[in-house]
Image: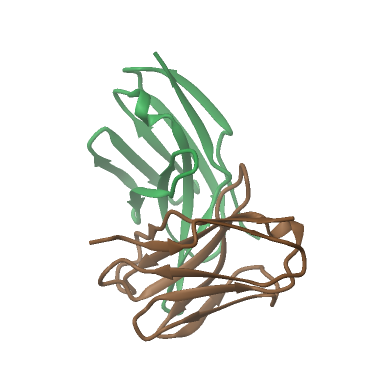
Amino acid sequence: DAGVTQSPTHLIKTRGQQVTLRCSPKSGHDTVSWYQQALGQGPQFIFQYYEEEERQRGNFPDRFSGHQFPNYSSELNVNALLLGDSALYLCASSFSRAYNEQFFGPGTRLTVL
Amino acid sequence: GQSLEQPSEVTAVEGAIVQINCTYQTSGFYGLSWYQQHDGGAPTFLSYNGLDGLEETGRFSSFLSRSDSYGYLLLQELQMKDSASYFCAVNRYGGATNKLIFGTGTLLAVQP
């Protein structure tokens, strides 16, 4: 079992650009959540996908959008990048009926210049 | 609103016991989780308390008191590899989602 995988590992973009981050959940998991972790802070919930729909959203602007595919993998898209979007983006997968544990991927380190 | 408070830093020596406290204020509380994160790594699940009381998993134990909106993580027989950030996180479950609200983390430094 490969666990949760994310790509790319690192990414450097400039302000105003757009970025797409990818996540493959742990085998058997059907739910994917995305988190943003700024340096020295705890992860902040962006949104969660289940059955290819956005089920819940945190306090993030519409520049942040996502998608879940039939194989449960997911993408996070961020448009019009700002310097403040520089962070570690974490994907977490879980099984919809097992609410107590989420498995995190290694993250994508995004740097916006 | 919602908030979680935990100490920013804790220092202890190898072999000792350390307790990391967490107080929370949130609606839709379902349970309290603890995650460990080494520098540059992914958060890894340590423990979950859905009911009041103590949960024990090896060297780690976690406690929850719903009436006090308080929990703690207890680490025993500390090892150097336990040096990491520890996050408490509220599980908010509703509408078929299980959302985690994280605290700001406690940086644990284990010294020889």
Residue at 45% over, 45% down: B41
Foreground residue among A51 and B33: A51
Residue at 52% over, 33% down: B107
Foreground residue among B66 and A43: A43
Image height check: is B22 above or below A22? above
Point out the image quarter for the N terminus of chain B: bottom right
Foreground residue among B93 and B16: B16
Chain A pictured colour: brown
Residue A5 in which image quadrant: bottom left
Indicate the chain coloured green by its letter: B
Image height check: is A111 above or below A79? above
Measured from the top left, where is residue B3 in percent x and y? 61, 52
Foreground residue among B105 and A15: A15
Image height check: is A79 above or below B66? below
Task: Decide if residue B66 is on the left or right side of residue A1.
Answer: right
Residue sitting farthest toward the top:
B112
Point out the image quarter for the C terminus of chain B: top left
Residue at 67% over, 69% down: A60
Measured from the top left, where is residue A63 in percent x and y? 69, 75
Colour pattern: by chain
Measured from the top left, where is residue A87 in percent x and y? 62, 54
How many callouts does the rendering have?
0
Measured from the top left, where is residue B90 in percent x and y? 48, 56
Task: Decide if residue B32 is on the left or right side of residue A46.
Answer: left
Residue at 69% over, 77% down: A62
